Image: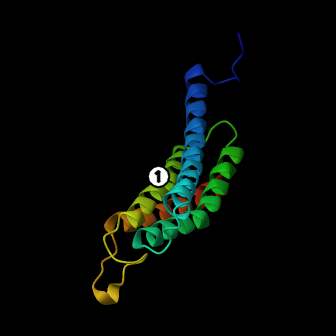
Amino acid sequence: RPRLPRGQSGSVLSQSKSAKMSIVQAMALQAATSLGLGVFMTFGFRASDNTSSDAYAKAHRANLNNAEWAPVILALQLGILHVSKDAPRALSVNAALAASAASVVFCIGVITASHEGDNPQTTKGDALPPVRALGALVRYLSIGVMIYELLQY
């Protein structure tokens, strides 16, 4: 039977392993979002040469935005996973999960928006879709928290 480090119980080790796995799952969600958007763009639009519709413009914007932020999010998640050793803090884990989930929410908000074109035209009375705004705000906040957390280890 393996020996535990002095002062640690089995439940503490299982909690830290669970926290590390949550960050890995957040990374997997972020990667799956990128893969899903890529497949959606390829087979939903490019394969059928349907690249001039509003639906394409929205999917393209979601894909580009995700491609912009996914590397930052993944780098921060990987950094936290590395520097936290075997004990990532709850705030780190929650920020990692929230950033990936918010990326999904943002993309859904962009793709399902009812306005014409890829971006709402506020001068024409279009409102920013609330799901899109929520995804963006949570993602930015989560990135900020991950930066803060990375510097605390």
- Location of residue 68 by image quarter: bottom right
Q: Which residue is mark 1?
A: 101
Vertical position of residue 39 compared to residue 45: above or below = above
Name the residue furthest front. 48
**Residue at point 60%, 58% (across, down):** 73
The residue lying at 67 percent from left, 49 percent from top is 78
- Which of 41 and 138 lies nearest the eye of the viewer? 41
Image position of 54 with respect to 39: above or below: below
Q: Name the side, left or right, on which 131 lies relative to 41.
A: left
Residue drawn at point x = 59 percent, y = 20 percent: 10
What amino acid is at disc 1? Ala
Looking at the picture, tell me which residue is in the foreground, 107 or 141.
107
Residue 80 is situated, as x and y percent measured from the top left of the image, at 65, 49
Quadrant in which residue 84 is drawn: top right
**Could you say which quadrant of the image residue 55 lies in?**
bottom left
Residue 89: x and y in percent read 57, 44
Q: For numbered disc 1, what is the local secondary structure? A: helix
